[in-house]
Image (cartoon, rainbow, N blue to C red):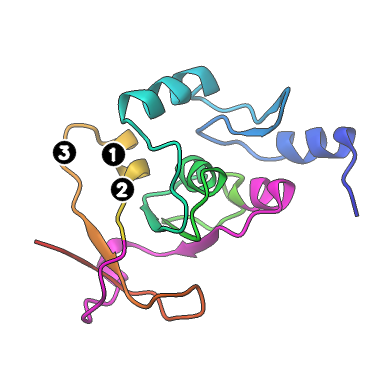
Amino acid sequence: MAVIREEKVRLINSVRRYHSIEIEPGLVTPGRVPLSYLQDMLRYLQFPESLEGLTVPDVGAWDGFFSFEAERRGVRWVVALGLHPPDRYGSAVVKSLLNSRVEYVQSTVYEISPEPSVRSTWSCFSAYSITCDIPCWPWTVSGASPDSTCSWRPTV
C-alpha cells in the first residue's frame, strides 16, 4: 500500500532526528544537520558512487543517514549499529518510507562478539561524522549473506 505524501510528512515530523535524509525528490526529513552539508561530507569522504554488492556495517549509525545512503548506492547488505532503539531518532520511520532493507542492531561495539570472521568491507561512517578527530577502526563482519550471524571485530 502506497503512503500518500501527507502521511509521509506526518510520519517524518513525528520523530526528531540528527541527520536530514532525502525520502524522495523534494521530501527531506528535518534534521539538525542539513542535507546539503551531508552531501558535501559525502564528497569530502570520497564516498563511492557505487557500493554494488558490498556488505557495510555502519558503526554509530544514529538515525541511519550513512546506512541509507550506502543502500542507495547498491550495497548488498547494510547493518546499522546504534545505541538507541530504531524508533528513537527516526531510523524506523525512514526505513519504512524508503522500503529499506537496512538491518538496525541496537548495541555497542563492546557487545559485539570477537569470534573469528571473514573480511567483507568496513565502515564507520557515522562514528566518523560524529567524532572526526579520532581514527576509525576497520571492522569485519562474519558470514557472506544477510542470513548469517553478524559478528564484528577490529582488524589490524
Label 3: which residue?
134
Q: Which residues are magenta?
A: 92-120
Which badge, 3 or 2, is on the more N-terminal residue?
Answer: 2
- Quadrant of the image for the N terminus? bottom right
Q: Position of residue 70 (x, y in %)?
A: 48, 46
Left or right: 131, with 100 as reference point:
left
The numbered disc on residue 75 is none
Q: Nearer the viewer, residue 54 or 8?
A: 54
Q: Is residue 145 above or below residue 37?
A: below
- Quadrant of the image for the C terminus? bottom left
Type of the residue with mark 2: Cys
Q: CA distance from mark 1 to mark 3?
A: 8 Å
| Label 1 close to label 2 by CB (< 8 Å) | yes
Label 2: which residue?
124
Q: CA distance from mark 1 to mark 2?
A: 6 Å
Q: CA distance from mark 3 to mark 2?
A: 11 Å
Q: Position of residue 17 (x, y in %)?
A: 56, 36
The quadrant where residue 26 appears: top right
Q: Outermost residue, left direction?
A: 156
